[in-house]
Image (cartoon, grey):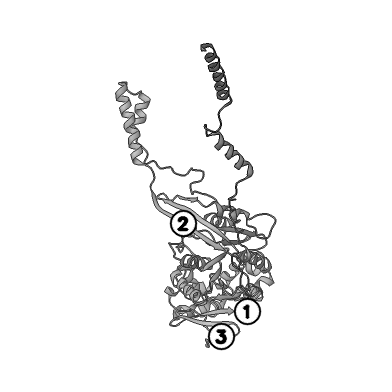
Amino acid sequence: MLTRFMEGFLCCLSSKSANVVVPVETSEPADGYEFVEVKPGRVLRVRHIIPDRPVLEEPTGQGGSVSCKRKITVYRNGQLFIENLGDRASAELKNCQNGDTEPNSTVEVELTDCGNSSPPVSIPESRRESVAAGKDEAAEAGGVAPAAGQADQSQQPRKRRRRPKRTVVIDCERKIMACKGTHQDVALFFIHGVGGSLDIWGSQLDFFSRLGYEVIAVDLAGHGASSAPQIAAAYTFYALAEDMRLIFKRYARKRNILIGHSYGVSFCTFLAHEYPEQIHKMVMINGGGPTALEPSLCSIFNLPTCVLHCLSPLLAWSFLKAGFARQGAKEKQLLKDNNAFNVSSFVLRAMMSGQYWPEGDEVYHAELTVPILLVHGMHDKFVPVEEDQRMAEILLMGFLKVLQDGSHMIMMECPEAVNTLLHEFFLWEPAAPPPPKKENKTRPETAKAQSDSIKATSDPSQVRPATARQTSSNGGAGEKANSKDKK
């Protein structure tokens, strides 16, 4: 503890972080790692694995097309009303499964933020005025004064209809196909959260690269072996999001799948919004609710850097206790081997203070049309399960899967279960709609005979009714009898 205190004291005197993470000197690819300079002096470590796989052409015509139709209305009081207009998307979500015998626990629903309140109904002004004028004319014509109760009701102020503050209409068709490791146009992107590194995805990178997938994982600035600029502005959300944009544009394929954890989910959402045609699917692991990011004013991370450096053992112990369901020797070794929560106090403070993203609200997430799998660890003390449930309700195509044995670092605690869930989601595709039935041009014999009989009976010159035939025969006999009498 005395050593920590001395290092923190020196950190205050030098105004620098004691444990600065710097990249390896060489920038040549080695052992699957590359160092990409996204900006002058800003170098990120990237693990890029392109496995040897046979060239297989994907058969055309597979997959299903999902209709993404919804209307999002935001009112001035903060109420959010989502009206789903696509029946096909809702049916596909309810029938999708993750390999279990039961369907997923969440489906697309219509919701409001006002509890059990009914959706607002607006009456046009012209109609409202005509109704009021009709009542006045009726009162004048009758010449009877309204009752006391009616007068009181008419004198009450009329409630003004709520006008929407913002309305977003989504109307598109999305083609969803299975993503296999043999498809060369598929790439998997892994983005970690605060305090992590690309090493936390070790089990996932090895698993999917063995299946033939091309995988890309990156260290955020100040994390792992990426460079750590000594300026707080380098760790804002927009600065880190721009880094992820450049990395994505460098390695993106035709179909890309984003996998984010914790804070990394926000960057996945940002990329899915920026490149909706290139993002095929997305996975959110313990990402939290669909709320705009805003740094907390009353947080331990607002303390001076030297104080945070002295408290780093306490912070590491708190992260171990809250991030893992069990706190044993295995979990401690996982943190050490995967270089998790091993960042400088300056980077940690700047990362927590730079989480400002006002655009990432519920409407921003509701506009996403990409299929999204949400994975949540039941024992997570950082992100409550209610937040991921809310996220699943807001998303157009969101599937929530809760694992009972995991916590915040679930990809390290339960790698087999997480890998299985992700792989099943990558291979999932909605059922293709049945081809439309062709109408038979040849008519049935019964219909043809019936139409011919109707046509025949409709011509009075060809067929006469029986009564008319009898009348005409009787009339002819009478005329002959009369002629004989005259003779």
Could you tell which of marks 2 and 3 lies nearer the N-terminus? Answer: 3
The residue that mark 3 highlights is 29
Q: Amino acid at mark 1?
A: Pro
Q: Residue 95, image x and y in percent?
A: 63, 54
- Circle 3 residues within 10 Å: few <14, some 14–19, many ≥20: few
Q: Amino acid at mark 3?
A: Pro
Instruction: Determine whether 85 is above or below 3 in the image.
Output: above
* Point 68% across, 54% down: residue: 102
- Circle 1 residues within 10 Å: few <14, some 14–19, many ≥20: some
The residue that mark 2 highlights is 170
Q: Amino acid at mark 2?
A: Ile
Q: Which residue occupies the foreground of this view, 371 or 459?
A: 459
Helix or strand or loop: what does disc 2 sit on?
strand
Instruction: Determine whether 335 is above or below 285 in the image.
Output: below
Could you tell which of marks 2 and 1 lies nearer the N-terminus? Answer: 1
Q: Residue 197, image x and y in percent?
A: 56, 75
- Residue 87 visible from this viewpoint: yes
Could you tell which of marks 1 and 3 lies nearer the N-terminus? Answer: 3
Residue ranking furthest to the right = 101
Pair 2/3: label in front: 2
The residue that mark 1 highlights is 51
* Point 67% across, 59% down: residue: 404
* Point 63% across, 44% down: residue: 445
Q: Which residue occupies the foreground of this view, 262 or 301?
A: 262
Measured Cα–Cα span from mark 2 to mark 3: 43 Å
The image quadrant where one finds the N terminus is bottom right
Pair 1/3: label in front: 1
Instruction: Determine whether 472 is above or below 349 in the image.
Output: above
